Amino acid sequence: MSTELARTYDASAAQTRWVQHWLDRGYCNADPDPARQPHTIMIPLPNVTGALHMGHCLNGTIQDLLTRWRRMQGRVALWMPGTDHAGIATQAVVERRMLEEEGKTRHDIGRDALVQRIWKWKNEYEARILNQLKQIGSSCDWRRVRFTLDEVCSRAVRRTFFRMFCDGLVYRGKRLVNWDTYLQTAVADDEVFHEDVAGHFWTMNYPVVDSSGKPTGERISFSTTRPETMLGDAAVCVHPADERYTSLIGRTVIIPVIGRSIPIIADPLLADRNLGTGAVKVTPAHDPNDYACGLRNGLPMINILNPDGTINENGGEFAGLDRMEARKRVVARMESLGHLEKVEDRIIPLMHSDRSKTAIEPFLSDQWFIRMDKLAQDAITAVEDGRVRFFPQRYAKTYIDWLAEKRDWCISRQLWWGHRIPVWSIRTSNSSEQLAALAGFGATLRPDGTIQLAPEYNGRLAALLAPGLAAGEELILCCVDAGQEHIEQQLAAAGFEQDPDVLDTWFSSALWPHATLGWPDRQHNPPLADSAPDPAAAPGENRVLSYFYPGSVLVTSRDIITLWVARMVLTGLYNMGDVPFHHVYIHPKILDGMGQTMSKSKGNGVDPLELIEKYGTDAVRFTIASLCGETQDVRLPVGYECPHCQAVTPQTKEHQEMKPLGGPNPSIRCAKCKKSFQFPSPWFTPDPDAAVARIVSERFDYGRNFCNKLWNACRFAFLNLEGYSPQPVTAAELQVEDRWVLSRLASAAREVTTLLDRYHFDQATKAVREFTWNEFCDWYLEMLKPRLRNPESRGTAQRVLVFVVDSLLRLLHPFAPFITEEIWHTLNELAPLRGLDQPTPAVESVMTAAWPQLPTQWIDDALERRFERLQQTINAVRNVRSVYNIAPGAQLKLFMRCTPDVAAQLEAVTEQFDFLSKTMLEAAGLDIKRPAGSASFSLGDADGYIPLEGLIDRQAELARQTKEAEKLRGFIRGHEAKLANPGFMAKAPEKVVNEIQETLAGLRAQLTSVERMVAELSE
RNA sequence: GGGCCCAUGGCUCAGUUGGUUAGAGCGUUCGGUUCACAUCCGAAAGGUCACAGGUUCAAGUCCUGUUGGGCCCACCA
């Protein structure tokens, strides 16, 4: 390591160096240590669907900041990394790509081949994601990286499902799914989009019949946009209070096209008197509202569709027709039978599949559910009693409101990529067949009707239908084992078939906090990557789980509070009997320049590595942390930097939406140099030989400038450390500025600690920046310059300087890990021993250094106030210099009218005046008179005069002071009005009244000074 | 339709339980090459705190409504 800092900081070299160094030294590893407290953060597992964007970068920055900070505080800080298989999203990406590139669907290649392809994709993107995380400085324990489909997580998934199955929490039910008839698959809600299409609105009627089935002549009218669903109608529904229909409620109608009789029912939740005719046909199997109505009223669910979108056998003569063709024929038939009243054209909002772009059909299918009542209640209680706390608190409402609905959780998905549901079933026709199917498992029927399996299956195989075999034709078993235990083979051999569906992705991510720590294995620590030796292994014990669970804080974004956070709490309580984390910090979302959230579908995502390349990781992290407040999302306008002339073109919505559309890659023309360039986009890869713009955002100048400042301040310090000798520094040796900077440092350290405790990252960043720049650099370093040149005073100055730099690097490390590490290592070369009381050897890495906790006694308010007057005086002199355009080098004289004790304080720092403002303090005291031709200023308790004979325009100075006096009079009037207000005097607290009076007195004194100056100038 | 959040100088944002003269960074203007930093230093200009009511001695801050924006959820015969 060099003993000097280079002229500029090379961010990318530092990043490469320290990422590897930290890895080699194992500084990020976290192993159980009973002597210390743990601090656990589980990463919100990124999906392996694609690369990380700025939202992940923000999320990671905060987690790493917290992890590094807690580690420095002496905790065993575990940050658990990993990725999510993201069932639907990943399968969709791979399928889409396969369709585009090879024209194949998953049915063409089969289940195993598709899953293999997805694994390949996963490996590629997982590597990319983990690399991105490393590049942003993430101090994860990389030995522990997990994937939701890996063996450890899979075991936890199967065990949880099995436990829930045995506890009766799992059941099979019907549910309407979004069915893509083209791809013949169910698609998730977020995989569908609304599009308005031209359609028709038919009004028809059904004839009312009497008890013998004869038409009474009455008819009931309704409207529909999907006449073919008539084939599956189970009722006609009206509002119970709708007087037009009260007489018809309970009567029967006939569906003319198929001759089925259905009842007229009343349901206030479904029927709306003000819509259409007020009566509505009910098709429970093909409409979500009708489905809910069907459940409420015990209606039959008549499915009329085949998976390919044709009408099935329930459609009578229409069976086999495509639903659109069936629609036409049903309408024609209704018309010919005289039941069509009118047709209107209408724009219909219709759901479409993202993938096939075809219309979605609501389709009733068998799904697995988890009963939520008790599980949800437990999770609500955990937040209500404070075992889990949200920051900011308002998000607890989102969580509780959602859980309070206690809607059962549909956990099955019609996909191939994911955890296959560990349920096996066989069709039988009676209980003896069922027992026969179970013969190989040593099954006997207990007297109470439940099934007894042979002991070796206890806890590994369970039957859903017990007690009471033959409750249905189907026998359903749940098997916890994977293939190795052979039970699955036995099941297959006995004729059982495994459910083809997989579990909802959130089922496995819900287990993340305990699954990653090895649950349900309580005997062994979870395996480490590449079978690395586990330093914390203990026989018969999973110490990793018992030590790191529950976690400390979950850091995530608000949109998955329900999907993920709630479910982690719920499964944590269910499996572990304890909450998965104590705090939930909800951070802002990253928005683009137009205020939209970043997402792949909008094409406005930004790869953090692009910005890191331009600004450096620390700059990006520091800026991001500075934007992480309580309420406001982070707006991040970006631009394209022209590769030819470096001019920046701000990104617009048009840019985000530019796609090749079969032609050449789109490009942007630079407004300045008129040349074209390509740009990074989620829609295409730029041509290999094309000039490609990079993404920039001037918001990151904030962090970059700060890093530059820090670097140069330390560079300056290090250039002045020649001859540094470690020695205790006594109180007597400390100069005013030393005591001041230590006071400020102690305050800053306390403040940053408190703010981080409360997750106020924006304020913490601001505090540390202001200390570094506005206090340490602007004042302390400047005041140190003369002392460092003087051999007499140099030693103490160096020792204090080294101490402050050391503390500063520690304070900044969680925010800016690379630059602080880089500087720290140089400091170690120059000043291996440091400390004020007793110099001690510094640790090798700032990452393992202790977080600064400085004595409260160092904070000296009186001293800070005196120092502040010095600063104000100097600022006032600078102001005069600037207003009168006086050459920076010109030496000025200063006279101060003030009390003797203030005079003494000012005289004690005469050299500082000279040095910082090229001004000699000539005299100070009560008897100072304004020298002729002076510029003047008032600080309230002291007035300053700077003789500027010949340089100052008397009239201009008079005008300046008159303006100042006017301003003061305005303030004074405001305060006087307050004190003259009887209401204020009677009702305001005494403290506030006193404050106003004091301020008023100060303002009046200052006005007196200014008025005297005006008088003097007017003479 | 329900819920949550936001609206403060040209831009991006702070503003603690209501209480002195509403702050910062960038941008703008003016002035600066003495050996840490022009990614810098010094100075200045720039705000009726979205709008309308209300509560209060006192409102950027609390309440109600309006407008505009974001997000989540529900729904659209």
Image: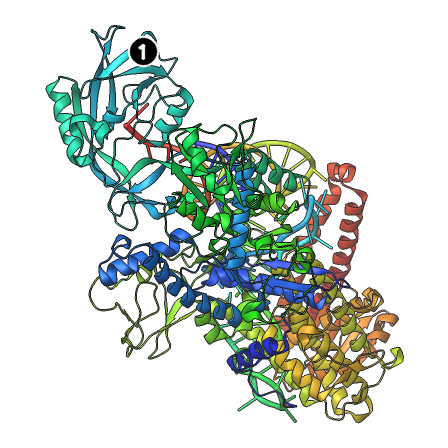
> Which image quadrant for residue A874?
bottom right
Percent position (x, y) of residue A350? Answer: 28, 39
The residue lying toward the viewer, choosing from A772 and A103, is A103
For residue A917, above or below residue A373: below
Percent position (x, y) of residue B71? Answer: 45, 47
User: What residue do we see at 38% from left, 58% from top?
Assistant: A600
The residue lying toward the viewer, choosing from A586 and A46, is A46
Query: Seen in the image, is A309 located left or right of residue A285?
Result: left
User: What residue do we see at 57% from left, 87% from top?
Assistant: A7
For residue A978, above or below residue A794: above
Q: Quadrant of the N terminus of chain A?
A: bottom right
> Which image quadrant for residue A709?
bottom right
Of all residues, the one furthest to the left in this rendering is A336
Q: Name the residue under label 1.
A: A245
Percent position (x, y) of residue A591? Answer: 45, 56
> Which image quadrant for residue A240?
top left
The residue lying toward the viewer, choosing from A994 and A23, is A23
For residue A76, above or below residue A263: below
